[in-house]
Amino acid sequence: MSIRFLSVEWYEALRAQLRTAPPLPGEGSTQLRLGQLVLGAPDGADHAWTIVLRNGAVPALDVGSVANADVVLVESYDAAWALASGDRTAGQLLEAGELKIRGDARRLVAASELLEAVAAASGALSELTTEG
């Protein structure tokens, strides 16, 4: 089974992966609303979503908006595909200037444990994802 990147089915699969993840590690009140904005997808649209991360809770997904995000990752479709497929890391894309961060990047560092847990939870999706 394969799922086309950024399709309705892909968002549904991402949501399902996040729902089945164990509660995120840590205690206290660490929270991050991480938005992602992908510009210039093959369907002619820009794609946006926000993942809400909280200690002790399962991540939630809000598709279609980054309006309430604390931090937004902005990249082209090609960069997003390279990240989703595992061909490149976020660090490589940042270094190359292909990934921009809007908002307080220190929030990403503070929530690194939460981000690692979400990456692990959504990792299986990359194996099922195909490009456009």
Image (cartoon, grey):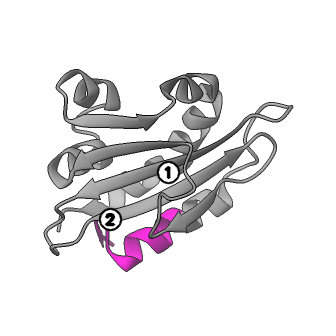
Quadrant in the picture for residue 131: bottom left
Residue 30 drawn at (x, y percent): 75, 34
Q: Does 51 appear in magenta? A: no
Residue 14 drawn at (x, y percent): 49, 63
Judging by the rendered image, the residue that carries numbered circle 2 is 47
Judging by the rendered image, the residue that carries numbered circle 1 is 122
- Is 107 left, or right, of 105 in this rendering? right
Q: Is residue 113 above or below residue 21?
A: above
The residue lying at 54 percent from left, 29 percent from top is: 108
Q: Is residue 2 above or below residue 26?
A: below
**Of residues 53 and 127, the one drawn nearer to the viewer in this rendering:** 53
The residue lying at 19 percent from left, 55 percent from top is: 77
Residue 84 drawn at (x, y percent): 31, 49
Name the disc covering residue 8, or none.
none
Residue lying furthest bottom in this view? 8
* Magenta range: 1-14
Please report whichever mark, 2 or 1, sits nearer to the chain's N-terminal start. Answer: 2
